[in-house]
Amino acid sequence: MSKVQAPDKKDAPKVEKIRYDKNGKRVRSLAVPRSLLWPALVAAIVLTQIPFLATVYFSTQRWNLLRPDDRGFAGFDNYAKVFSGSELYSSLEATFVITGTSVLLSLVFGLGLALLLNRTFFGRGVARTLLITPFLVMPAAASLAWKWNLMDANFGLFRWVMNSLGFDAIQWNTDVPIISVILVLVWQFMPFMMLILLAGLQSQDSDILEAAALDGAGKIKIFFLMTIPHLRQYIEIGVLLGTILLLATFDPIFILTGGSGGTKTLPVLLYEKAFIALEVGQAAAYGVITVILTIIFATLLLRTVFRIFSQQGVR
Amino acid sequence: MNNLKASFKSWRRSVTLGGSLLTILTWVIVVIVVFPILFMVLTAFKTETDAAAFPPKIFAPVTFENFESVFDRGFAPFLINSIIASVGSTILVMALAIPAAYALTIRPILRWRDALFFLISTRFMPFAAVVIPLYLLLSTLDILDNVGVLMILYIGMNLPIAVWMMRSFLEEVPVEILEAARLDGANVRKEIIRVVMPIVAPGTAAAALIVFIFAWNEYFLAFNLTANTARTLPPFLGGFVDARGQFLATLSAAATLSITPVVIAGWLAQKRLVRGLSMGALK
């Protein structure tokens, strides 16, 4: 734990009873750190694991809040219903299309922004500050601003732009719901990718880049052969974290489209099953499926993060 | 001032045609990216008629009446709920996270890695997956629509991020300083409060700000587990959805008021934002 040489026994203060292991290293009791950790662990377990176990239990129950008397053990009936119906598959498709496209586009635009910000220019700090704003703005507020101020077919700014360009106006969030949702999500997550990739660009050793330039490597060659490989782990973290956050996205979709027109992602479907249809059992089954999907991405993410930690070295 | 001059000079030296074009491009993109928010803030200061006018008026005579009508529509209680839920949960999260991070870094327990990964794995579960049992439990206990409950639930949401962030800051505390404090006979309490905390104060502030931002913006739980008395700002704003544009200026004013504290907090924390977003994996 420490590289500082352990003091001789006789020099040690006599405040607490101090023991040393056979290498002369001080042995400190683990009781204290344990007592510091357990409140956090208990809070995490009570607030997240127990509700999830309850979800698993409810997913085996035949239980609709509209028919409270008809309740009982249903085994895997809820899952059978979920898998034999079509809602799960259309929802998986919506989730896949919206999450996948949003992650990919925000990564590409985020990389572009990070490259633009990785230069020295006047007002760079201000530009960076302004560019992260979409990620800080309350998603509910931002979605409403997009929906009414920009996308509305009667007085929105997009109507004016399209009319000026000679096109007919459309009601964005109902005529092209998937595009509208992706547009807002990309706008919101682009700064997130930008920040992560900018951290990657700035961690690149400028001496090596200069040496490569002196050796006659062109800018494009340096970018593809050196910068992109260096950015790989940053891209991985960005993609995995972005995927996990976007998989759980609810408010922008709910506010923009209410889940209509191919935008009913798993969280929106789950919300409808639970709070509109009051199907506790089925909603819980969807919940379990959503968690399993997320765990797949989370496991990949943890491996990546762990690799970065082992490279940095841990005390 | 001298600094500004120096940076201006170095900027002048670096000016080339291609560079200038890239700088102009960058600023054009900045304006486009910020525009949806800027337009919303501008709309907040227009009359309702100007806000719903076509073609849209980007600039219109300034009025403050929307902010008055926001408060007439009962904005204050929702604002207070948001403050209680996010400030309260931030304080509690930090109170749990700092000792936990200490036990995972400076005096690591055995299997600290497992504890760390268990904590973060709890953050990956979408809240949609657990909202049903939460709802049923709260309704059985008759504590739906309770801002204290919301505050507690936000602890579960933010604790892992806070622990991971604090851990990455505590790792940078020099071992020598800790050894010196221990030789002086400092116990754990003193060591944390007198030695560790002053060193990681900026990081702690950043972690708290990020936790605060996530709690402030949270929609799903607030929307499903509160009705009227405990409702926070995000679902309150969502309630404007049916406005059909009639209250666009008022909505923009309410949204502007709702985003301001967090946007400023985020700007202040931006240098450490990336560490928080990557859970401490990236510096």
Image (cartoon, helix red, strand yellow):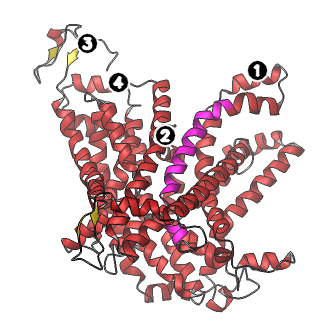
Q: Secondary structure at mark 2?
A: helix
Q: Which residue is mark 3?
A: A6
Nearest the viewer among A54 and A208 is A54
Mark nearer the viewer, 4 or 2: 2
Residue A153 inside the magenta-drawn segment: no
Q: CA distance from mark 2 to mark 1?
A: 33 Å
Q: Secondary structure at mark 3?
A: loop
Q: Position of residue A29 (x, y in %)?
A: 16, 25
Amino acid type at image mark 1: Ala
Residue at (75% x, 53% y) in the render: B26
In the image: residue B31, left or right of residue A86: right
Q: Quadrant of the N terminus of chain A?
A: top left
Amino acid type at image mark 2: Leu
Q: Chain of mark 1?
A: A
Give the prevailing secondary structure in the magenta stretch. Answer: helix
Whether residue B193 appears in this view of the structure is yes
Mark 1 Cα-neighbour bin, 10 Å: few <14, some 14–19, many ≥20 = few
Q: Position of residue B275 (x, y in %)?
A: 49, 42
Q: Chain of mark 3?
A: A
User: Label 2 near label 3: C-beta < 8 Å?
Assistant: no
Residue at (33% x, 71% y) in the render: B225
Q: Which residue is mark 4?
A: B175
Magenta range: A229-254
Q: Quadrant of residue B9?
A: top right
Mark number displayed over residue A301: 2
Residue at (25% x, 34% y) in the render: B191
Q: CA distance from mark 1 to mark 4?
A: 36 Å
In the image: residue B230, left or right of residue B36: left
Q: Which residue is mark 1?
A: A211
Amino acid type at image mark 3: Ala
